[in-house]
Amino acid sequence: MEKIISLEEAVNLVRDGDTIMVGGFLAVGTPEHLIDALIAKGVKDLTLICNDTGFIDRGVGKMVVAKMFKKIFTSHVGTNKETGRQMMEGETEVVLVPQGTLIEQIRAGGFGLGGVLTKTGLGTLVEEGKQIVEIDGEPYLLEKPMRANIALLFAEKTDLSGNLTFHGATRNFNTYMGAAADISIVEAGEVVPVGEMCPDEVVVPGVFVNYIVDGGAL
Amino acid sequence: MDKQQIQEFIAKRVALELKDGDLVNLGIGLPTLVANFVPEGRKVLFQSENGFIGLGPAPEADQVDPCIANAGAMPATIVPGGSFFDSAMSFGIIRGGHVDATVLGALQVAENGDIANYMVPGKMVPGMGGAMDLLNGAKKVIVAMEHTAKGNPKLLKECTLPLTAVNAVDLIVTEMGVIEVTAKGFVLIERNPDYTLEQIIAATGADLIISMNLKPMVVS
């Protein structure tokens, strides 16, 4: 199957009301071209699952400013005043999730697991409404899997099969979100033919990537 | 001491806690300064929760790589022998007990080791980021903070703000002294000679046990 699509085709896959996962950590390793194109298209009522809400002018923060989210699951909003404002004024529902729990919920969602058990959040607001499971006398919080309609990812390089490699600290959530979404779209800095990538260097196998946008050509 | 001197004084004292071979995660702000004061001869590796071990100092302006930043999105470097990984690996390292020490700031710490450092309801709600995982997973939790906030004690019998973790803090380093969190409560083990015991007790919102082996808090 041909995985290369245009930026326009990519954003047309995202529909009003969708749940989207977006890779990146404070806008490092975020697919900025996909985000800009989504803002230009103007989808709305999205639910966001992302490590943080970036900055007002970088990463998913730009989508917060464009008021595209009705609900956000994230570990940190402190770098984006607009998220804070929307949260305080009740415009957007923000669910704060511990970072290590968020990535595990996504991993569980993509890997066929019914959830994860963690001590993180015990005795805090995070445990509200959740099941506490005792394992060998030790309490753990049951955190359920998360899935999305669409995952928007960034990779340094991909081949035409969608095998991904990364540079620096850009792996963060990009390696697991593709597994946890019905459709995953990667914006890659470079696209190479099949066979040009050494199988040893592949970090994410192409099975988790449905579509590729050639970011290097934009 | 002005604010900057206070922060450096605290950071220098925290740095003495780090041991040769330790893997350490530093929080944003004051804790980040600790990396500048690791005693010579001790090889300490820093973990950055956004996905690497071997966090190095900030690069020169012409050497900035936009893909290499610390957990506060500031340009960073990676030291020889370092490694990059994703967030599942990063938090496996943190939650799994493979980080020897974490240094974090706090809004409040209670005498049983409870800590509040991620939100003030209705005012400031930045989120917990990786702090809840670090507090649960790191082998040693060191709080680096000023002893009071606008004159109000931050060391309390019980936290009044939403908790980031329960029973988590091992050691507190402030400009006034070094305090161990024990089963009996706060124990002052070092005193900054610039402050009297009475001043420190008055600035603490819980009982303060004075160690039999109380030492002066000295940094180079």
Image (cartoon, rainbow, N blue to C red):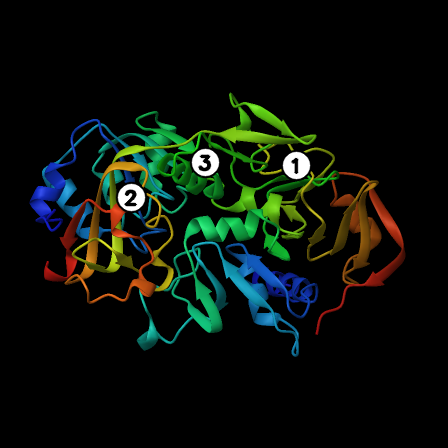
Q: Nearer the viewer, residue B44 or B215?
A: B44
Categorize mark 3 by other alpha carbons within 10 Å: few (<14), some (14-19), many (20+). Answer: many
> Disc 2: which chain?
A
Horizontal side of residue A113 vs A126, given as left or right:
left
Amino acid type assigned to the residue bearing label 3 in the image: Val
SS at mark 2 in the image: loop
Amino acid type assigned to the residue bearing label 1 in the image:
Val
Q: Is residue B45 visible?
A: yes
Q: Quadrant of residue B14?
A: bottom right
* Disc 3 chain ID: A
Residue that label 2 marks: A178
Q: Position of residue A64 (x, y in %)?
A: 26, 38
Answer yes or no: are tags 1 and 2 on the same subunit.
Answer: no
Q: Residue at x 80, y 59 (%)?
A: B190
Contact between labelled residues 3 and 1, with CB atoms less than 8 Å apart? no
In percent of width and height, residue B103 lies at: 60, 55
- Report whether residue A57 is seen: no
What type is the residue that disc 2 sits on?
Gly
Category of crowding for the residue at label 1, using alpha-carbon neighbours closer than 10 angstroms: few (below 14), some (14–19), many (at least 20):
many
User: Closer to the N terminus: mark 2 or mark 3?
Assistant: 3
Residue of label 3: A97
Q: Nearer the viewer, residue B105 or A128?
A: A128
Q: Residue furthest top?
A: A129
B51 horizontally vs A14: left or right: right
Residue hosting label 1:
B166
Q: What residue lies at 37% left-to-right and 34% top-to-bottom?
A: A109
Secondary structure beneath dot 1 equals loop
Quadrant that contains the C terminus of chain B = bottom right
